[in-house]
Image (cartoon, rainbow, N blue to C red):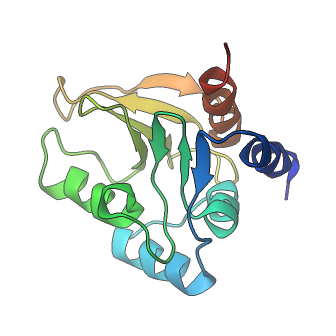
Amino acid sequence: MRIDWIEKLQGLLNTHDDMSMGNPASDKEINEAQSSLEVVFPLQLKAYLKTFGHLEIWHNALYGLGPGIPDYLSLVKETLGERHTYRPYIPVHLLPIQNDGAGNHYCLDLSSNQEDPPIVFWSHDDDESQIPESVADSFTLWLLEVADESFKV
């Protein structure tokens, strides 16, 4: 498993007051979340959840799991809401990881790379037949880009 991205994010956590993490998720919490959402999490998402729980990077709040996570950052609660309550419904192969603040979501596309899937953008202004816009080739690259962009002066 690649850990260089984890070390980079941990370094940022140690040097920036505008970045915080939650409580790391346990294997049990991850398994329960996968069962609730009827998906298998990619390896790099599991590493993120086990290491950080969830992240808040300046104004970017990323979903996650773990003890004490606020409801608005709960990967399970937000994903189920986006699949069954809020239109357009996000398909099962997309896993929301961040709300952009306007009802749109950055999502992991679980239909491809099972280790480090790409990130796509799901628009709440389009319907369920939309083809999400590709944002990044992998979850880990996207996560590092979010952190880098947040701290640029």
Q: Position of residue 125 (x, y in %)?
A: 17, 23
Quadrant for residue 35, please give it: bottom left
Residue 53 falls in image quadrant:
bottom right
The correct choice, above or below, for 113 with respect to 146 in the image is: below
Query: Percent position (x, y) of residue 151?
Result: 66, 24
Residue nearest the observer in this picture, 135 or 101: 101
Q: Position of residue 60 (x, y in %)?
A: 48, 36
73 sits to left or right of 82: right
Q: Is residue 86 above or below residue 88?
A: below
Q: Residue at x 66, y 69 (%)?
A: 50
In the displayed structure, would residue 9 be above or below residue 43?
A: above
Task: Tell me the quarter of the picture where residue 106 sits.
Answer: top left
Q: Quadrant of the C terminus?
A: top right
Report the label total: 0
- Residue situated in front as seen by the camera: 116 or 97: 97
**Along the line of sight, the residue nearer the viewer: 72 or 120:** 72
